[in-house]
Image (spheres, rainbow, N blue to C red):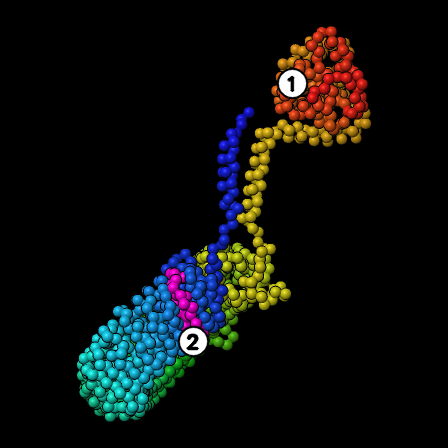
Amino acid sequence: KILIPLGKSMHFIYLVSCCLLPTWVRFAPTAGYSLGSCVAHGSLNYTNRLKVLCYSEQLRLVPSNIPPNVTVLDISDNLISRIQLENFRNLSNLRVLNVSRNLISRVAEGAFKHLVNLQELNMARNKLSVLSENIFEGLGNLTVLQLGDNNIKSVESTAFRFLLSIRFVNLTTNELQHLNKVRPILKFPHLQQLHVGNNSLFTFQTEDLSDFPLALKVLDLSWNPLTKLNVTTDILPKLESLDLSYSGTNGSEEWYIRDGFLLRDVKKLSLNGTNISEEVLFSVLQCLNSSLEVLTMSNLKHLKVKAFLNVTCQMLPLLRVFNLQGNSLGSLGDGLKPCSLLRDLDLSRNKLVQVADFVFKNMSQLHALNLSYNQLNAVPVAVRIITSLETLDLSYNSISELKSSDFAKMTMLKELYLVNNLIRDINGSAFQDLINLRSLRLGKNHIWMITYPMFLSLRKLVVLDLKSNQLSSLKNGTFQNLNSLKSLNLVDNQISEIEEGAFQGLLNLTTLLLGSNKITGDILRTGTVFSGMPALRELQLFDNFISYESTAKLKSPPFSLLKSLKTLSLNSQGHEGLLNLPSNFLEGLDSLIELHAGRLNINFLHPQTFSYTPKLSFLDISRNAIGNLTPQLFQPIPNLTEFILTQGRLQTLDFLIHANLTQVKILRAKGNELTVITESLIRSLPSVKYVDLRENSFSCDCDNSWFLKWALHDTYAQVIYMNTYFCKYPPNLRGMKLIDLKMDSCSVDLEFICFISSTTLVALTLLASFFYRFLRWQVVYAYYLFLAFLYDNRKKRRRPVLQYQYDAFVSYNTHDELWVLRELLPNLEQVQGWRLCLHHRDFEAGKPIIDNIVDSIYNSRKTICLISRHYLESEWCSREIQVASFRLFDEQKDVLILVFLEDIPACQLSPYHRMRKLVKKRTYLKWPGHREETRMFWHKLNIALQTRGEADEENPLLSGLDTQD
């Protein structure tokens, strides 16, 4: 027998407890990745890449479930009225925060103190009126502060003291009346841009702002009623841009610059709409004549601009960019002649009807000229003289004809804009000198035909825009000389005929836009309509009239020659739609990556449809009532990463389970009839990051419990706009948000079950170990007693009168076997004739010992226990007396005879509680110490063997025997 020491037993229990602890402690799930009204760009697993967008969602409070590792947070365009102290407590990684276009009127002091890494804060277009003392606490790394379009009237003197790294401050459109409110922020050495336009500033005096030079490079004072502007101290030595647009009070202003040296680095000056006198204007320009390079003087409606154009150019010898748009000049004489060094001139929106022929004669360095939004009916002759011109914009005029001489000698021109004119016919010779032209924009005209050789000389042309014209056909060889062309835009014409070879020669064309025309399936039937474009990467055929009667294979697939095509747009075909997609329609598109096939009115896709596009990664088949989508349809496109199935009347997405789309990252199935999203569906899309299932008919029951749990707690994928998912079934929950559904009754708490199971297992193991160590034989004994009980009941039913094989079973220890053979057997069997059962003689060989014991005791009328010290120490003797004791208890008959072969003190009987219990309750016989007393012993034993009746009916002959106390 092995005994486990107490110390080791405790160690065992400790180990069991340690094993149980992980299943008992229930950890809280990871913060959910479904952010309700917000959309996260990036993964929770990447600290420096997470961007959360919550704009335009009617939010009234700052969302509380923003991931702590977000770096960009946009909650603009909502209904938030206050910033609470705890709103951004856990967002220490935030670098950009946009809370613009809200109703914020109050910010708790210290609300930003945890944003120690914030670099940009946008609070524009709110209702702030006061910048309190500690409003910017903690923003020591902030570089950009946007506070425009508020109601700020008051700024505490220490409000900006935490902004040690600030570079850009925008306070435009507030109610500031004095610049001393922002004086503290000017002291910071890194501040480069200050915008205080559209306030109520009446004065700007450098002597009141600072006593030392500032680092400002850009100063915006526009839209202020400045009556006094005094620059008398040298505090702006680095200022490069000064905006005084729409300032002044129409003649009553006092603008004074003591010395031009004080603004020696100002290169850009904006005086748009300035309400000042000509005298003040000239004085300002005179002070900046040594440095000014860019001057904008738009919308000077109250000044006679023509009168001082000549003087302005003479006064500013370094002027390079001159913006005069919106001044209603009407005509242009020789006022710009002195502006010989200009590189960029903007004369748009001036109602120009005519331009003097030699107005630009001296502008030999002019590179860009903007004459758009005027009333010119022909290309001005003055333009032809500018041989240095690289960009010419004549858009939005009334030009109806292009002559061969219009662009003569303009060999340096690279960009020509003629958008939205009245051009109907184009003379091919109009562009003959534009040998370096890169971009030609002819959209929104009335061009009805392109004739050869219109583009003969444009061999370097890269972009040709002919959208929104009246082209009806494309003839063979139309574009054959445009070998460098990369983008051709023919959208929104009336093209119904494309001759074979129309695109011949476009060897470098990468983008062809043919949307919104009248192209039909017959045009594409030859299969060679798109020949001549080996490098084409994008083809748009949306909003045409392509249709097919069946899905049968085409003899000549239309795109078989476009081996390099990567993007194809077929969506929104006119009339009744595409109707059918031929099974080999996409044949030849081995490189296709992106396919737009939405709103085609197709209800079936052949299983071989995508077998020709193995590299497809984007697929849009939205707004099609395709009833039978099978997994086999999508198995040829395992690289699909974005799948759009919106508004397709789909009732299930289970076809995706075996579609092998393991690379899908974005799944959009908005506006269908989905009721249940299964676990197997989500598991089949292991790479999915964004799921959009809005406007579906969700069933709010346990079938969606797994999906709801996954949507809220998965840290990799995001179910966007989860708070807009509503229940449709059952009827009593219709209209309730899916996110509000309680799924406690649906979930099986595996952790708790494991805890209970493991606890029970360990407890049973401990109990089994305990019973095996201390009560093993009692259990065995009880088992056999139970069997005996069943056996006894069965015997009682079958045999009313018991028949015993033996008169007595003798239970003794082997050390007492000699006494049994010499004394017991001769007297009881030979003299008195009793039939005894002895284990060494009568046990059945090969039968288990315990079975022999039980059978022998129950096959004997009595059991004689010969008790000695050796008997008490014997394990098998203990089993025998246990069985006999149970028979005594079970049958309630006098079946047990105790015989003590030697004197045993009560103290030695104490450890043997069962024996002591029997001795205390029953009379027993004791082997006499003297020979003369043996006859009485055998006589009493003989009488005991003859006893019948109940156990409590003591035989009178035994009533005087000894008892143990």
Type of the residue with mark 2? Lys
Q: Is residue 746 visible?
A: yes
Q: Give the position of the N terminus as an image quadrant.
A: top right
Q: For the magenta stretch, what is the residue range?
A: 91-115
Which is nearer the N-term, disc 1 or disc 2? 2
Q: Secondary structure at mark 2?
A: loop
Classify 454 as above or below 958.
below
Which residue is rendered at x = 45% and y = 70% of the image?
Answer: 82
For label 1, count other residues whose C-alpha is less than 10 Å away and answer few (under 14), some (14-19) or many (20+): few
Residue on which the image places disc 2: 127
Which residue is rendered at x = 24% and y = 92% of the image?
Answer: 307
| Residue 182, position as x, y percentages in the image | 32, 75
Which residue is rendered at x = 68% and y = 29% of the image?
Answer: 784
Q: Give the position of the C terminus as an image quadrant.
A: top right
| Residue 576, position as x, y percentages in the image | 52, 75
Type of the residue with mark 1? Pro
Residue on which the image places disc 1: 905
Q: Is residue 386 visible?
A: no
Classify 825 as above or below 97.
above
- Res 894 → quadrant: top right
For label 2, count other residues whose C-alpha is less than 10 Å away and answer few (under 14), some (14-19) or many (20+): many
Which residue is rendered at x = 35% and y = 68% of the image?
Answer: 120
- Res 399 → quadrant: bottom left
Q: Secondary structure at mark 1?
A: loop
231 or 449, nearer to the observer: 231
For residue 118, side relative to residue 633 (left or right): left
Magenta region's main secondary structure? loop
State the CA–CA distance, disc 1 to disc 2.
102 Å
